[in-house]
C-alpha cells in the first residue's frame, strides 16, 4: 500500500483514535487526518492541549480505526457479530509542520487549504505530519458472507520504517499430522506434499493452531 491508499482507508473511517504516552501512561483521544502527500499523513491539534506536549516530547503516535461500525452485535448463539469491514492501524514518528510550510503546500494541493483556514481561525492550532510509520489493514468477514475465508491482512510501511508486526510459522518440528489445518477456522494453513505452512495475510494469530499442535511446532516470530 502507498501513502495515498493508507490515507484513503483512514479517511473512509473519519474519526480515529490517536494514542500517545505521557510519563509511561497511555493517553488516547479522537481526531482525524486531513491531508496526505509524499511526505506523510497530516493532522492538527492545539499547543495548549496535552496531545501537543506528548507529541513534541515522544515524537511518536499510534492511530487506529474501524469501519463500517464499532457497535457490537450478537448472533442467534449470543456470540459477537460484526458485519464485513476493516480496521486499520499505523504507528510511527511525527514532526511539527511550520505554518508557512503548510500555506506553501496549500498553494499546490487543495487538501491543505482546510488546515490553513483552521489555523487562521484558531491561532493556537498546529499541524503534525506522521512522516514514517508501519501498520496494517485488517479486512475481515468473520461469517464469510462475501467470500470463502474470514480475513485478509495487508501490512504496510513508509518513510523508511520496516514492519515489526509478529507472525506465526510452522517450524521443522512439524510431524505432518494436519491437526492445525483442521482446527484453523481462518483457512490460513495449507499443505503441499505434507509440508504445512501458515499464510500471514489470512492468520488472525488466534492461537488455535498453537494450542492444538501436539509437538509444539507453532512458533511466533
Image (cartoon, rainbow, N blue to C red):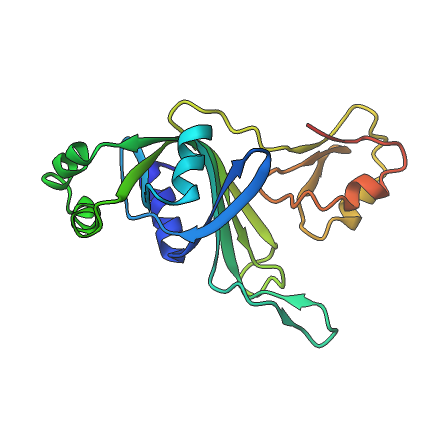
Q: Residue at x 63, y 64 (%)?
A: 143
- Please name whichever residue, 149 or 78, is drawn nearer the observer in this view of the structure: 78
**Which residue is most to the right?**
214
Question: In the current view of this chain or complex, which residue is farthest to the bottom?
Answer: 76
| Picture quadrant where residue 194 is located | top right
- The percent coordinates of residue 24 (x first, y second) are 59, 34
From the top left corner, tell me how far across and down residue 200 is, in percent. 61, 37
Which image quarter holds the C terminus? top right
Q: Position of residue 83 (x, y in %)?
A: 55, 66
Looking at the rendered image, the quarter that the N terminus falls into is top left
The residue at 9%/40% (across/down) is: 107
Along the viewing direction, whichever of 144 and 59 lies nearer the viewer? 59
Q: Is residue 156 visible?
A: no
106 horizontally vs 63: left or right: left
Residue 199 percent location from the top left of the image: 63, 38
Residue 102: image quadrant is: top left
Amino acid at each position: 500500500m502507498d501513502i495515498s491508499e493508507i490515507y484513503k482507508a483512514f479517511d473512509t473511517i473519519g474519526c480515529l483514535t490517536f494514542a500517545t504516552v505521557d510519563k509511561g501512561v497511555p493517553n488516547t483521544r479522537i481526531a482525524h487526518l486531513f491531508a496526505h502527500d509524499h511526505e506523510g499523513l497530516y493532522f492538527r491539534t492545539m499547543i495548549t492541549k496535552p496531545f501537543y506536549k506528548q507529541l513534541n516530547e515522544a515524537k511518536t503516535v499510534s492511530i487506529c480505526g474501524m469501519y463500517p461500525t464499532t457497535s457490537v452485535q450478537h448472533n442467534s448463539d449470543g456470540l459477537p457479530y460484526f458485519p464485513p469491514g476493516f480496521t486499520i492501524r499505523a504507528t510511527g514518528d511525527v514532526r511539527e509542520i511550520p505554518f508557512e510550510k503548510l500555506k506553501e503546500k496549500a498553494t499546490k494541493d487543495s487538501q491543505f487549504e482546510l488546515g490553513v483556514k483552521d489555523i487562521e481561525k484558531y491561532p493556537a492550532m498546529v499541524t503534525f505530519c506522521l512522516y514514517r510509520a508501519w501498520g496494517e489493514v485488517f479486512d475481515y468477514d468473520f461469517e464469510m458472507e462475501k467470500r470463502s475465508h474470514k480475513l485478509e491482512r495487508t501490512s504496510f510501511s513508509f518513510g523508511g520504517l520496516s514492519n515489526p508486526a509478529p507472525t506465526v510459522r510452522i517450524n521443522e518440528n512439524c510431524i505432518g499430522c494436519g491437526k492445525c489445518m483442521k482446527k484453523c477456522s481462518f483457512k490460513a494453513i495449507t499443505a503441499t506434499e505434507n509440508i504445512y505452512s501458515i499464510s500471514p495475510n489470512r492468520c488472525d494469530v488466534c492461537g488455535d493452531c498453537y494450542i492444538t499442535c501436539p509437538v509444539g511446532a507453532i512458533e511466533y516470530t
